[in-house]
Image (cartoon, rainbow, N blue to C red):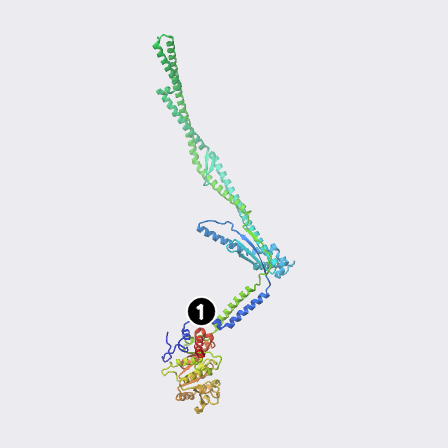
């Protein structure tokens, strides 16, 4: 910690507490205080304002509660479901669904408080002509002679009244919403709540139908246009096909919406190709059979010839057997020979006939194949021509497909909108409002709680304002930072006895405080405490005379010879504090009376001598500024160790600056919690301009308001502690 020094470089005591240590010294040396402690101290210091503000607010709350008109609240409950609930497990999709749902519900809450809904309720309930409504809110009855402007103005005021009275309260974590009305009539509150929810449901349905109606009108116009476009494109397609001779037998649409057609030429080509394949197969078979006939294998394999050959073999075998037993001319042998010759002729005949048939079949197959091939070539040529011409037809077909897709899609949307327009409403009424059997307001407990909060706020504002406007010295250590003066002593406030009597008791708080001051004075100069000291203040009643008296008493109690000079000749006070006469004194000496010994009054009770102020002179400043005052100081210094001069206050008077030049230094007295900083600064500037040496400051009347800075606690604890020990 930085050590304080006076103008001569001599170190000063940094701790103004009675013993130089302890709670008071540590708190005083602190650079700042916790915010909570500052707030608590401010409340304690201004407790009267705090108590008054809170009491006033509570009183106003009571008055408001008893004078307020009772209000009855009725509530209707509705359920609002989203139009299209989304169920998905994808995180991003679920987040977007929640955001959309939140926006949906916020929109519904805003619609419930909308002015348009209030207008519907006004019209549905005919509230401007409702006697109960007019009586409840003390409105003017409708006048048949009112102009339309007056009626609109009246309706607007009723709408504002409804919006002020309605309350929309969503039920947490649900799709339910409570709509409440508070009026002076329980039946009217229930009626308005039911009207509000009913009109909200109706308005939602109306908006749905209005939206679908607009959409249907738009879609109908678009469908008409698209239908015309589709018909035009189909007509162009058919005309082109007719002009080019393209005959379409069938068409089909794939999954992508493209139409695939089958023309007559294509079908014929497919049929001819199939017939040609079969004809070619038949020609190959006929050619194979003809080749077999040429090689003889066909005759062997023919069924008729094979049968004849088997029969011939049988006859030949029988003939051979007969020859073994009979001669050639035997009738049976001759018969068998004839039969065998017949069979040979039959086989020959049958073989020739089979070969001729195969050749004819082969020729027919070849002819059929050639005819079909020629027909296929002709159709293929025609198909190729149509394929080249079908490029434009494909373009026209694509346009037809596009127009048809647009038309069918829009037609489907038109049907969906028609179904949605007559769908169920997503808003339903859960509970109807009932007339309340007891008023909902005024609520005494709630009003008192609000009044208490307002009172606390008002008290906080007043305390804050007072604290900001208070520029007095509350922390004695501030004299160093604000005014550049060392703090030499902090003097506690005494209420129960006179300072002159309290300072005699060496166990008292006053004595200990001034003893600490005397200790700090001993460090000011090389020879100890200054021998001549002037005590002054910025204004009267700051404790300078008490400080002069007590400092003289403490110095005398430590074996020093001390004289106290009352230099406040305009308003002397030392004689009143000491209860001594003020016949001859300083003013007489300064006026030329040299009988100084007769002016010095000994005070055995206090241990020092005193020179009273004497009679009040007409020219106090001239007397104090004369050389006689300097001569007085020199004379007294030859007789006493210390001279204490109690001067007049600084502001408005020239006495203190004149005296300050005649003494060794000045002690400046500041009253805590009273004197403004601006006043103190002005007074100090006057002293400094006079060339006076300022030893430091004494802060007097340190009381309960200064406890937070350690001084009140230090004195209250330190001085009472010794007294309690003695009592024990």
Residue 433 % position (x, y): 58, 55
Above or below residue 401? Residue 382 is: above
Residue 5 % position (x, y): 37, 78
Residue 75 % position (x, y): 57, 56
- Can residue 686 be seen in the rendering of this structure? no
Above or below residue 55? Residue 518 is: below
Above or below residue 632? Residue 362 is: above
Q: Residue furthest front?
A: 728
Residues 533 and 190: in front is: 190
- Residue at 36% from the left image edge and 15% from the top image edge: 313
Residue that label 1 marks: 35
Residue 617 % position (x, y): 48, 88
Residues 396 and 415: in front is: 415
State the count of labels.
1
Q: Residue furthest left?
A: 324
Q: Secondary structure at mark 1?
A: helix
- Can residue 391 be seen in the rendering of this structure? yes
- Quadrant of the drawing holding the N terminus: bottom left
Residues 124 and 25: in front is: 25
Number of residues whose C-alpha sits closer than 10 Å to that of mark 1, classed few (under 14), some (14–19) or many (20 or more): few
Above or below residue 601? Residue 352 is: above
- Quadrant in which residue 132 is drawn: bottom right
- Quadrant of the drawing holding the C terminus: bottom left
């Amino acid at each position: 910690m930085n050590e304080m020094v006076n103008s001569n470089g001599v170190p000063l005591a940094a701790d103004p507490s009675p013993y130089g240590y302890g709670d008071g010294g540590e708190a005083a040396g602190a650079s700042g205080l916790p915010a909570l402690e500052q707030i608590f101290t401010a409340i304690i210091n201004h407790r009267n304002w705090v108590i008054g503000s809170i009491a006033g607010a509570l009183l106003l709350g009571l008055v408001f509660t008893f004078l307020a008109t009772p209000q009855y609240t009725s509530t209707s409950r509705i359920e609002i479901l989203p139009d299209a609930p989304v169920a998905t497990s994808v995180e991003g999709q679920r987040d977007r669904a929640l955001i959309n749902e939140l926006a949906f519900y916020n929109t519904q809450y805003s619609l419930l408080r909308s002015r348009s809904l209030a207008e519907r309720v006004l019209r549905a309930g005919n509230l401007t002509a409702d006697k109960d409504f007019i009586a409840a809110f003390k409105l003017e009855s409708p006048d048949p002679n009112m102009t339309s402007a007056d009626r609109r103005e009246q309706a607007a005021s009723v709408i504002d009244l409804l919006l002020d009275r309605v309350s929309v309260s969503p039920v947490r974590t649900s799709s339910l919403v409570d709509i409440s009305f508070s009026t002076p009539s329980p039946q009217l509150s229930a009626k308005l709540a039911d009207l509000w929810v009913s009109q909200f449901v109706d308005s939602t349905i109306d908006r749905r139908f209005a939206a679908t109606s607009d959409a249907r009108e738009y879609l109908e116009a678009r469908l008409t246009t698209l239908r015309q476009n589709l018909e035009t494109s189909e007509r162009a397609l058919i005309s082109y096909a007719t002009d080019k001779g393209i005959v379409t037998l069938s068409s089909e649409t794939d999954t992508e919406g493209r139409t695939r057609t089958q023309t007559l030429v294509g079908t014929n080509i497919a049929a001819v190709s199939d017939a040609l394949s079969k004809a070619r197969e038949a020609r190959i078979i006929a050619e194979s059979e003809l080749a077999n006939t040429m090689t003889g294998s066909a005759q062997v394999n023919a069924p008729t010839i094979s049968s004849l050959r088997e029969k011939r073999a049988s006859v030949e075998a029988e003939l051979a057997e007969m020859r073994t037993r009979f001669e050639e001319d035997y009738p049976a042998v001759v018969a068998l020979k004839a039969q065998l010759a017949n069979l040979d002729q039959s086989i020959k005949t049958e073989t020739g006939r089979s070969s001729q048939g195969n050749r004819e079949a082969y020729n027919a197959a070849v002819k059929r194949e050639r005819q079909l091939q020629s027909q296929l070539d002709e159709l293929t040529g025609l198909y190729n021509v149509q394929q080249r011409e079908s490029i434009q037809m494909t373009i026209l077909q694509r346009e037809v497909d596009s127009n048809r897709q647009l038309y069918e899609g829009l037609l489907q949307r038109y049907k969906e909108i028609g179904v949605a327009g007559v769908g169920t409403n997503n808003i339903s009424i859960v509970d109807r409002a009932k007339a309340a059997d007891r008023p909902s307001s005024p609520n005494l407990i709630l009003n008192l709680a609000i009044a208490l909060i307002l009172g606390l706020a008002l008290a906080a504002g007043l305390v804050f304002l007072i604290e900001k406007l208070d520029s007095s010295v509350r922390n004695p250590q501030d004299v160093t930072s604000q005014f550049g003066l060392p703090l030499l002593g902090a003097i506690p406030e005494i209420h129960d006895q006179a300072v002159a009597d309290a300072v005699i008791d060496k166990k008292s708080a006053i004595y200990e405080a001034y003893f600490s001051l005397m200790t700090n004075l001993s460090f000011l100069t090389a020879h100890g405490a200054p021998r001549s000291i002037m005590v002054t203040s910025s204004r009267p009643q700051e404790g300078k005379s008490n400080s002069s008296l007590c400092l003289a008493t403490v110095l005398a109690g430590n074996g020093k010879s001390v004289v106290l000079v009352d230099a406040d000749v305009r308003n002397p006070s030392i004689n009143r504090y000491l209860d001594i006469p003020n016949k001859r004194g300083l003013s007489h000496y300064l006026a030329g009376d040299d009988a100084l010994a007769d002016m010095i009054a000994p005070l055995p009770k206090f241990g020092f001598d005193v020179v009273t102020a004497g009679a009040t002179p007409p020219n106090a400043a001239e007397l104090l500024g004369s050389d006689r005052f300097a001569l007085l100081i020199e004379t007294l210094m030859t007789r006493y160790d210390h001279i204490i001069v109690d001067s007049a206050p600084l502001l408005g008077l020239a006495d203190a600056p004149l005296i300050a030049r005649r003494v060794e230094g000045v002690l400046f007295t500041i009253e805590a919690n009273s004197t403004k900083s601006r006043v103190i600064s002005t007074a100090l500037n006057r002293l400094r301009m006079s060339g006076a040496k300022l030893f430091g400051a004494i802060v007097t009347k340190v009381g309960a308001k200064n406890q937070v800075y350690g001084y009140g606690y230090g004195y209250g604890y330190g001085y009472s502690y010794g007294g309690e020990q003695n009592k024990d």
